[in-house]
Amino acid sequence: MIEPAVTLVRCRACRRSERLTLTDGRFWCAWCQRWADVDAEQVLGAAVVLDGDHFRLAPVAAPKEWQQPLRIPSGWLIGWNSFAEDDIDPTSDSHGGFQNLFQATNEHLRRAIDVDWRVDAGPPVIGRYRLQVLSLVAVDSNDHRHASGPLAVDWDAPLHDFETAERVALVEELEACLRGERG
Ligand SMILES: [Zn+2]
């Protein structure tokens, strides 16, 4: 994420910024009345705003935490959702290995959706999203299927399997799954 910043250019002699004019790649200082040697200074988290008839530096509110918009129909119970917050860079190995990003269940549809981020052992480092639609099955206390037992995710037989490195493609597929259009 790029932080808002302003670069100030000051005349080295008078330290003024507002009297400088850039002409043909050189700065003319109207205070000193000569071509100026300049210093540049970067101010992070600031912006130039018009205040009455002059400009001033104003602090910029820190950008809100990035969140992936996700349309989730009613009926889904979200067990885990770091997908909305983690903006993964596919070329970065800082999320190496395996990361569970999203898990939701819908008892009415008897479905579960699971999204992971996986990175193969490199080089090159290649990451991808993996989305699965799974069945919710009734099991007994020994994890065997039993009509009257509590619901559990059947990891052994995915109904739908989708892989992509593209976040946009993943979001489209995930929303289709949440609408019940896959598996
Ligand atoms: Zn000057």
Image (spheres, helix red, strand yellow):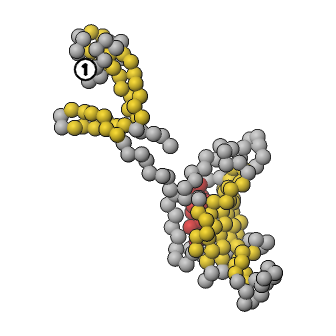
Q: Nearer the viewer, residue 146 or 173?
A: 146
- Image quarter where the C terminus lies is bottom right
Q: Residue 147's x, y, as percent? A: 74, 89
* Residue sitting at x 61%, y 77%: 106
**Type of residue at label 1?**
Arg
Q: Residue 17's x, y, as percent? A: 29, 22
Q: Is mark 1 within 8 Å of ligand 1?
A: yes
Q: Which residue is mark 1?
A: 19
Mark 1 is surrounded, within 10 Å at the Cα level, by few (under 14), some (14 to 19) or many (20 or more) other residues, namely some
Count of numbered labels shown in the rendering? 1
Is 157 displayed left or right of 19 in the figure?
Answer: right
Is 167 displayed left or right of 127 in the figure?
Answer: left
On screen, residue 172 above or below 75 = above
Q: Residue 37's x, y, as percent? A: 36, 12
Mark 1 element type = loop
On screen, residue 118 above or below 133 = above
Q: Residue 49's x, y, as percent? A: 28, 38
* Residue sitting at x 66%, y 73%: 112
* Residue lying at the far left of the rendered structure: 53
* Residue sitting at x 28%, y 14%: 14
* Residue lying at the far top of the rendered structure: 34
- Whether residue 173 appears in this view of the structure is no
* Residue lying at the far front of the rendered structure: 141
Is 183 displayed left or right of 75 in the figure?
Answer: right
* Residue sitting at x 61%, y 83%: 108
- Whether residue 139 appears in this view of the structure is yes
